[in-house]
Amino acid sequence: MKHLESASLDALIEALRHLDAGFADLPEFESAAPALDRIGPVLHEAADKLRDNYPYFHPLYAGQMLKPPHPVARAAYALATWINPNNHALDGGRASSAMEKEAVAQIAAMFGWQEFLGHLTGGGTMANLEALWIAGQLHRGKPILASADAHYTHSRISAVLQLPFEAIPSDAIGAMNLNALEDRAKRGDIGCVVATLGTTGTGAIDPLPEILGLRDRFGFRVHVDAAYGGYFTLIDNLTPQTRAAFDRIPQADSIVIDPHKHGLQPYGCGCVLFRDPAVGALYKHNSPYTYFTSTDLHLGEISLECSRPGASAVALWATQRLLPLTKDGEFAKGLTASRQAALELTKHLRESGDWLVPVEPQLDIVVWAPRDPSKSQEIFARAAERGLHLALIRRDNILCLRSVLMKPEHARWINEIMTRLQS
């Protein structure tokens, strides 16, 4: 194949044989799965339908937050589905639960936490829901605050939890306005402030050090929504202000990060972490049939979700085994390349003289507009005709173009992207 990676299929088949050998002592049996002889045509039909997609895996796709999983994640996920473990209770996911605990501990260690409570979720929305649910349990009825540029999920989650929600204005670059937050905090009734480290619109970074300072004065919780940006804590080519925010993440009360974004995982894989393990007592519930086979912690005892795919944990564990979360490792170098791609695209756009780039990218997201912004929609469509796929975002009532340069390969494709854009 020319475009879709397939070498990992050989490794998957070998691993599947190795897995099968681990059950050699079982009596032989024939699978009762129906229609095995007719799988081929159905898969070809599925492939035909899947071709009706943008080429998310290719560097010329520079639009939304879509990053291909690493081949080891795809293969490990598929391998686990032959067992199909459920990481709710140890009965249904003994090995994969242990792998989840190990993988989540490695994510926590990336933020400097050794003592913590955490687990995987179906995505960032569920992870943020759990963090705000804990905040609501500890500060009952008090408002949740987030910036106007924070993800819309926070207002929706607050409504689900029946907690008041307030949006704090953002500054010119899309970060929370600290003066507005301080003025609001003086009323003394805030339950939790969500600090976003990497907004999904522009990649903006809220001023976490100053928000933590206000927490010390006014006593609210601080939840860091790093669903998009969290892994950037591993890289060195951030601005000093952005670096300062990431360095203070360990002082937050809770953190959310999405391995299915920059963590090279298939959808859906989110992660929620709590600095104080004692919040686990708030999850306490009774189950009449799932928690009696072991005195070890069942992950369902510290999660609002019940059934959860053990395959997600296996895929994450395998990826972090191959690519450890270290500042000098191959994983971090891929993020550094994505960040460099954003800086290079910004430089080229400004040097061409045809484009306006209102703010420096803080991560790997670039927002820009033609000098006549009324042409943004037309350029978006014409770029797609030339095989370059961008995104659109409205900022200050101006329709802008937007690129999320998530793939490390983007760093080598900026010239080609500019050529097609200029055409």
Image (spheres, rainbow, N blue to C red):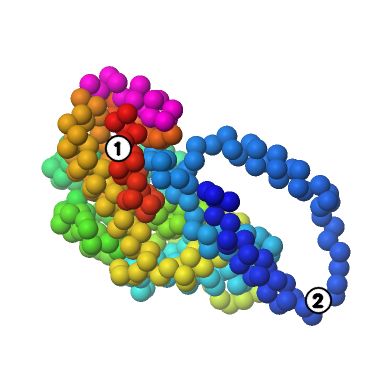
Q: Give the range drawn in magenta.
A: 372-386
Asked which secondary structure carries label 1, the reply is helix
Q: Which residue is drawn at 34% across and 41% down?
A: 416
Residue 258 included in the magenta stretch of the image: no
Label 2 sits on what residue type? Leu
| Nearer-N-terminus badge (2/1) | 2
- List the single residue furthest toward the bottom: 25
Question: Which one is nearer the viewer's eye here, 201 or 400?
Answer: 400
Q: Residue 342: x percent and y percent?
A: 27, 46
Asked if residue 133 lies left or right of residue 112, the reply is: right
- Residue at image location 41% in from the left, 41% down from the top: 60
Q: In which quarter of the image is the C terminus?
A: top left
- Residue 181, image quadrant: top left
> In the image, what residue type sits under mark 1?
Met
| Residue on which disc 1 sits | 418
- What residue sits right under mark 2 in the picture? 26
